Amino acid sequence: MPTAEQLKTLVKAHYESSPERFITVALQIASHEANLGHIVLANDLKKIIDAAKLYHPKQNVLSNDLQGFLVEVQSNVRLSDLVLPVEILERIKRIEREFIEKEKLHHHGMKNRRKILFSGPSGTGKTMSAYVIAHELSLPLKVVLMDKIVTKYMGETSAKLRQVFDYINSNQCVYLFDEFDAIGAERAKDNDVGEMRRVLNSFLQFIERDDSSSIIIAATNNLSLLDQALFRRFDDVLHYQLPSEKEKITLIENKLGGYKGNYEVSEFVGSIGDLSQAEITHACYDSVKETILSDKKTVEQELLLKMLKERKAVYNKLK
């Protein structure tokens, strides 16, 4: 059964003529019913919702000021698609569960965790995790392009951030502040300009005051550069690492799928080096494409190793 909060949101969305919000909440209810094992009911709800979308095409509600650095991204990535340590997967599940059962937490005076910081090397699954959370909760995913806010609107960035948080407050979504280092650098750094200190101070105020129902995720590749005052503003901090040997094997086998040849990945995985999940994925896909173009049925071990070494060579040059 839908929660009291969901019922209120459904009624409000109906009378405010907000079909997008109505559909979002309806999808959350369908997902919750599926998790309870009510598969027939969940499927019926989704069929009704899919039919409704034909009569209520999605509208672009972004103002001209927000277009260009707040973009919606479609996500079909599931939790099962991620190859990450069990600890990270469990913490992602906890975020999702607390959101689904937030009414139960609110009844006991508790709030669900929804302001999250992802840190770790590039390509280790931070962005994909945001995609998963949005998909699993049937919420739209909006990406805030921080580098464009800072470089394009220097001198007006704080005002633009205020507009973003106003939008967050009135539109329940998953918001990913990508490349968060652009404004999150420590305020005490000697090379930090006064404008960026003011921008960071503004962000700290906005995120602390935010009491929306949206999930806010900030992703950074350089945790050490972030201002320490940021950490207490987030409900949770997840640290991502380069994949372990076991995770590399699982990732390669998953990405090759039916194209994998008759060899054991464990026999050569130690020679891959410190490649990220993203780089390994690209190497696997490159191998599959080359195999298809060569009219072969499976990816040969020599070809896979070649593609992995190419990725490793590029990675080493970037160090």
Image (cartoon, rainbow, N blue to C red):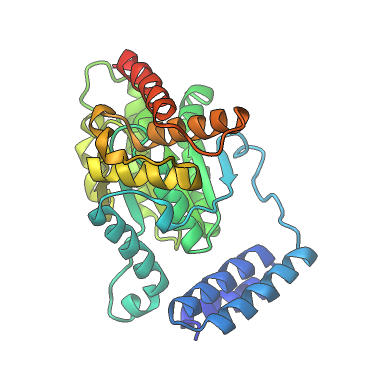
- Please tell me which residue is depicted at 32% across the width and 28% down the height of the picture: 197
- Taking the image as shown, residue 189 lies to the left or right of residue 314, namely left
Viewer can see residue 244: no
Establish if 85 lies above or below 220. Answer: below
Q: Residue furthest front?
A: 262
- Please tell me which residue is depicted at 41% across the width and 57% down the height of the picture: 80
Establish if 93 lies above or below 8. Answer: above
Quadrant where the C terminus sits is top left
Q: Position of residue 231 (x, y in %)?
A: 23, 45
Viewer can see residue 59: yes
Establish if 122 lies above or below 111. Answer: above
Q: Quadrant of residue 201?
A: top left
Q: Position of residue 26 (x, y in %)?
A: 59, 73
| Depth check, front residue: 57 or 46 | 46
- Please tell me which residue is depicted at 34% across the width and 63% down the height of the picture: 93
- Please tell me which residue is depicted at 21% across the width and 31% down the height of the picture: 224
Q: Position of residue 35 (x, y in %)?
A: 44, 76
- Taking the image as shown, residue 289 lies to the left or right of residue 250, namely right
Q: Position of residue 285 (x, y in %)?
A: 50, 35
Q: Residue furthest bottom?
A: 1
Q: Quadrant of residue 193?
A: top left
Q: Quadrant of residue 107?
A: bottom left
Establish if 54 lies above or below 314. Answer: below
Q: Residue furthest right?
A: 55
